[in-house]
Each structure stands twice: as structure tokens, then as C-alpha cells.
Image (cartoon, coloured by chain):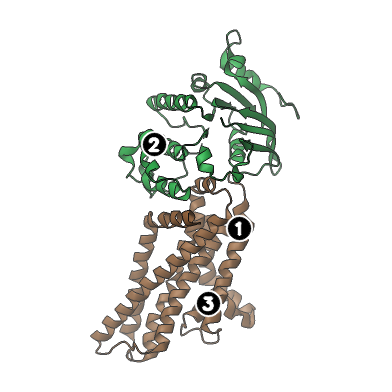
Chain colours: A green, B brown
Amino acid sequence: MTDVSITGLTKRFGPVTAVRDAGFTASPGVTGFLGPNGAGKTTVLRILLGLVRPTAGEALIDGVRYADLRHPRRVVGALLEATGFHPGRTARDHLTIAARLAALPVARVGQVLDDVGLAADAHRRVGGYSLGMRQRLGLAAALLGDPQVLILDEPANGLDPAGMAWLRGLLRDLADQGRTVIVSSHVLAEVAQTVDRVVVLHAGTVRFAGTLDELAGPGTGGLETAFLRLTSEPRLEGSRP
Amino acid sequence: MTALLGAELLRLRTTRGVWLLLAVAQLLIVVGVSGVMRSRDDVGSPEVQQAAIAHVGLISLFTLVLGIMAMAGEYRHRTITDTYLTVPRRTPVVVAKLVVHTVAGLLFGAVTALVAVAAAAIWLTGRGSSLDVGSTDLWLTVAGGVAWNAAFAAIGVGVGALITNQIGAIAASLAWLALVEGLVARLVGDAQHWLPFALGSALNRLPTATDGPPQWQAGLALAGYAVAFVVAGVATTVRRDIT
């Protein structure tokens, strides 16, 4: 059981406030992290992962800041963007470097390549990969440490329909194994089939945090209606849901 | 730290860039040595042989670029995100790169020195002369040239940590060596001997470095530059948000 908790999180980039007093918790299962483009989703996730310093507030994994985790890759796996690869390096080399850096057994590299269906292409240079293959490689890197928490930023980007179905199955498997999975997305249809809970972010503030049924259960008009209602309201200064 | 060093070494080995730089450097050193050996009549003199071999030190331009690519290349390809996810405390990442690339620069210089000595020996044999292997000055020049390669690799890591834009960092460094240092030198009087390229020249005992500090002081001063750049990079750029 590993929980993620975010409280009073604020991030200002110069004059722009990207995240404003945001807070939510995520427990085992799949949490959909929704919001229109520019809502601040990526910033929240990057603060959670210690890549961006918050202006105020904190983001904790099992009560600990990411930077204070002793073996971060064994606790948290992250997929942030499908661009973090050296084009001249093979997928296997990319993962072997990550495994070496994280002091993980190199045998994990073959396992995760199998898990994401890249074993046959592992010896190819990443420069020749499609976007979907890069997403799979990013997922393989996230799974490398067999972590209890997975943070996936728009993992469905670039996946074809078969890839989407595969990703849904993977997310369900991970959740069934008792892991805490946070998936950001702006593709609502994708989310409706996969997630247990939903956090809706808009203009840097959390507009909703609860179960999918509470947001879009029977008689509510569906997820899209609820999403558009939550993300079209004028900004409420300093408000919290 | 062992894991960091191992990963860094693997990172260095698994791209083509480093091997390409090494290959081109060997081509250039042969050209450099051959130029002296072909144009001079007194190839038997120790000074001429030393001048030919001293080209080893100039190859430090390549190790400088290699060092810059170690840090700035990670920002360019955004692999830095994954690196900092694994090692959230960032300073050890830079230190590991510094260690691995200083050693890599040393090896790079050593390979180049070997090729330079071999090329000189072949030329000299062809011209009925021989390399003055008993000359201490010759071997001090070789050692200085190798050390210059190591020092510039270390400085490169520091520059890359400070200027994470790879193209910008390489352009700024090469501009400094090709143009800016020469202009600054005229402004600062005797301090000109303590600018990076002048120090490298002194370390390498280049014919052009006549009024510079002794070899060991030049080496120490270059190490000081490397440390200063790394510290400046760690204190500023490396701490910044990765967005």
C-alpha cells in the first residue's frame, strides 16, 4: 500500500502561476489525472518527481519527498515524455544504463522489454523508433524497478488502437497487483474505461477529486459533460473544491 | 558512486559520437605531425621533433567537446530527466561525469600521443633520421599534451553543467579558443599566461608558450578552471527546474 499525497501545492514560473494550492491523494488503483492542455498537470507530476521545486506546499510518496527516497526507481516509476532518449543508442543500451544507474539487476532489462513488447526491436537505435515505440520504451523504463507507484504523463500519446488496448490491460494489471497508478490524460474516452478515481485540474487548481462514479455516474450526463462543466467555470481565486 | 560511474562509462561507450571524435582526432594528429616532418629540413633536431609531437595537446579541442556533450548532451536529448529521476540529488551526477570524462580525456590523449609518436617515427625513418627517444623534453611534451586532453575534458564537463544548451556551449568554447582569448590577452597584461589556452600551451610546452608558467603550475591552474566551472554549474544551472 503506497499512497501519494499532494497538499497546498503552488508553483509560480515568474509571473505565471501554473499550479495554485492544489491538493489530492492517490491510493492503490488507477487515478486519472485530467485537465485541458495547460492546466498544470505536467507541472504537478514533475514536482511530485522532484524535477521541479514547488513555490509552496509539498508532494509526498508514502510520506516522503521523492528526493529523500533511498531507491527512487524501486518505489516510483515515471513516464514523462516520449523524447528522453539518445537517438543513437539502442533501446537495450538505454535501459541498461538506467538499470546500472539505479543499481538494479541488468536481467530486469530483458523482462521489461518483454513486458512492453519491444524485445524484437531492442537492438535497434531509438532514432528509428515510432512515437508509439518510444512510449513503450518509456513505459519499460518506468517498470524497470518494479515500483509500487507509477506516474504516467499522457502514456496513450502516439499509440495505435491496438496499443491503446494493450495499455488499458497493462494499467488494469498494475492496479490489480495493488500498485498506485496515476495517469494524466486529456482523452476522456480513454480514461472512462480504465480509471477508478479521477482528479480534474483546471487553471492550476483541483476542481474535482473523487471516484469516477461520483463524477460521471448514472444521471450525471456523462464524463464529458462533467469535465466541460468543471473546466469551463471562470477561475475562482484561491478556491478549493 | 560506483553505480554512477559505471552508468556514465556505459553512456560514453554506447554512442557513436565519441568514436567518431576519436577517429577524426587521429586523422588530424597524423596530418599535424606530417606537416612538420615534411616541411622541415632539420627533422633530426629535438626541437623540431618536439614541435611535431606537441600537436597532441591541440587535440584537447576534441576532448573539450566530449566533456561538454557529457552534460549538455543529456539536456539536449532530455535524457537528463531520467537521470535525475534515478539520482534526485544532482551533484553526484556531475561529479561522476567529471571523473569518467577526465579519465576518458586522458585515454583519448594517450591514444593520440601513441599515434603521434608512431607517425613521427615512420616519417623520420623515411627521411633517414630517428626519434630522439632519450630526450626528456620530448616526453615531457608528450605527457603535457595528454594532460591537456584530460584537463580540457574536465573543463568541458564544467562548461556543459553551466551552459546546458549544447550548441551554445560548444560555440562559446570554440569562439573563446579561436578568437576571444587572443583579444582578452592583450587587455590583461601578464595575466594572459593564465588564460585557458595559454595554460594548455604551457602545459604542452608548445613552441609558442615561452613566457608562461612552468608545466606543473599550468596543469594545476587548468584543474582549477575545471573545478570552478563545475562548482558554478552545480550552484546555478544544475539546480534549476527540469520542465
Kind of residue indicated by mark 2 = Met
Query: How packed is label 3: few (under 14 Cα within 10 Å), some, or many (20 or more)?
Result: many
Which residue is drawn at the image coordinates 49% and 52% (left, top)? Answer: B74
Residue A192 visible to the viewer: yes
Give the chain of mark 1. Answer: B
Q: Residue at x 57, y 18 (%)?
A: A212
On the picture, is B193 further left or further right than B23? Answer: right
Which residue is tagged 2?
A133
Task: Same chain for labels 3 and 1? Say yes or no.
Answer: yes
Position in image of residue A231 (x %, y %): 64, 23
| Residue B170 visible | no
* Residue that numbered label 3 is attached to: B219
Identify the subunit bearing mark 2: A
| Image marks 1 and 2: residues in contact by CB distance under 8 Å | no
Residue at image location 62% in from the left, 25% down from the top? A200
Residue B133's mark? none
The label nearer to you, 1 versus 2, is: 1
The answer for how far apart the CA atoms under marks 1 and 2 are is 34 Å
Q: How far apart are marks 2 and 3 (CA)?
A: 48 Å
Q: What element carries label 1?
A: helix
Q: Nearer the viewer, mark 2 or mark 3?
A: 3
Q: Which class describes the residues within 10 Å of circle 2: few (<14), some (14-19), or many (20+)?
A: many
Q: Which amino acid type is shown beneath numbered disc 3?
A: Gly
Query: Crowding near pointer 1: few (<14 within 10 Å), some, many (20+)?
Result: many
**Side (left or right) of A218 relative to B99:** right
User: Is the residue A213 above or below the residue A237 in the image?
Assistant: above
Query: Marks 3 and 1, Cα distance to the nearest angstrom?
Result: 23 Å
Front-lying residue, A234 or B124: B124
